[in-house]
Image (spheres, coloured by chain):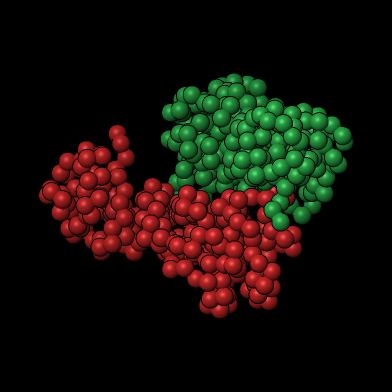
Chain colours: A green, B red
Amino acid sequence: MRQAPRLYVDAPLAAGGEVALSPEQAHYLRHVLRQSQGDSLHLFNGRDGEWLARAGGGGRAASARVASQLRPQAGEGDLWLAAAPLKRTPYDLVAQKATELGVARLIPVMTERTQSTRVKTDRLRAITIEAAEQCERLTVPKVTDPFTLARLIADWPRDRALLMGDETGGGRPLAEVAATLEGRAIGILIGPEGGFAPAELDALAAEAFVTRIDLGPRIMKAETAALAALAVVQAIAGDWRAEAPRPT
Amino acid sequence: MRQAPRLYVDAPLAAGGEVALSPEQAHYLRHVLRQSQGDSLHLFNGRDGEWLARAGGGGRAASARVASQLRPQAGEGDLWLAAAPLKRTPYDLVAQKATELGVARLIPVMTERTQSTRVKTDRLRAITIEAAEQCERLTVPKVTDPFTLARLIADWPRDRALLMGDETGGGRPLAEVAATLEGRAIGILIGPEGGFAPAELDALAAEAFVTRIDLGPRIMKAETAALAALAVVQAIAGDWRAEAPRPT
């Protein structure tokens, strides 16, 4: 039997409630999955846990009737990724994979050498929603509006460690750094292809919350560096650990 | 100034030697990079280190004159990835990113639930060569012909740890497992979308060289799981460590 489809909605979820679906969701259920009225689906909204629901009738104005809660809302970690925009395909990949890797917040950061100046945050949000639906998360990462690097530094919470991918050779091995950060709020900062400019490196090095990290002997593409760093941090200091709380 | 292009060749490399370039390489140098005779390029072949060379003349039968060695050949680790084929785009991504993450051998593994039965190893080899050129490796990963899972198990070197991504919940956290493997030969096995079949899980569990690993609480796509596992193993037990030998 095919698993019930899993959809993100914005509306509150509670037993007996009626939830409107978007035209895209209605189309997906009816014409891609060939669902009929009464078929099962799972809904989550980032706040109320995950619910079993039944497809309602209706044409384009489709809805679902909420039945019973499948999972209560649970904490899902608080890892942030600040990443300079890349070309469309690799940055889409960052948004999708960062969602699978449990990022809570994706912050596009404009740096001196950032080539892609237009960031389509709506597109990135749609990608994170689809990835969250597929990877069983109960939340969708927040995609913020773009920050300049100066603004990111100025606004960064001083108690949140910022691990900065440093291609100039000055960083500490990531596994070593991550091992000191269990229980800390963490963010990762990955620059554009071409790296940070010298003045940017100086500005980052001046901040006590910044730790420069080394990501091994090869020159990785920026999207690879972002995803690799996220995986290592989750494995060593995040929710891949045995002792990390697991959703039920 | 633009960095010299970096090309993989098959021929031996030694000072004063003349190396034939492929028509594709000649086209790339002349028409994409607009190089002229005498311009610098870097060559490596996986055996003789990296060399400075000068573009030669000639039409389609272009060549380069080898000048001086830039880096001696050095060990580059021996991490293997055995991964069930996926659709074209995600498996191309696995080949490219596995190269950036330092994999020495990529083994396509056919399993019961593998959907993609045709593996274009030539295509995968071309992707690994291009990724190796770009990430400053001195070697190109070996892409083997496809193995069945039964054959992989039968032929697997008994002294090489095989870390198997286990979505059924029976695995140990990867960071814990990796911390016990410094200095060991390691391979990672990632199944297809849909996971391993029960009989496959049993066959794997019966082998002493297999350790089932847990990759966190989210359901990752197979390509994400492969790349995340590679990053964690390199960071904890591979060449991202401070004490790992670095090429000069």
Count of picture labels:
0
- Please say if A11 is above or below B229: above
Relative to B7, is A174 on the left or the right?
Answer: right
Q: Quadrant of the N terminus of chain A?
A: bottom right
- Please say if A159 is above or below A239: above
Residue at 57% in and 47% down: A228
Foreground of the two, A37 or A168: A37
Q: Residue furthest left?
A: B58
Foreground of the two, A202 or A127: A127
Question: At which x and y percent is residue A38?
Answer: 78, 42
Question: At which x and y percent is residue B102?
Answer: 48, 56
Residue at 71% in and 51% down: A3
- Please say if B17 is above or below A3: below
Residue at 63% in and 35% down: A27
Asked if residue B123 can be seen in this view, the reply is yes
Residue at 22% in and 54% down: B21
Question: At which x and y percent is residue A39?
Answer: 75, 44
Q: Quadrant of residue A41?
A: top right
Relative to A182, is B77 on the left or the right?
Answer: left
Asked if residue A137 can be seen in this view, the reply is no
Foreground of the two, B70 or B34: B34
Q: Quadrant of residue B163?
A: bottom right
Question: At which x and y percent is residue A9?
Answer: 72, 32
Foreground of the two, A153 or B133: B133
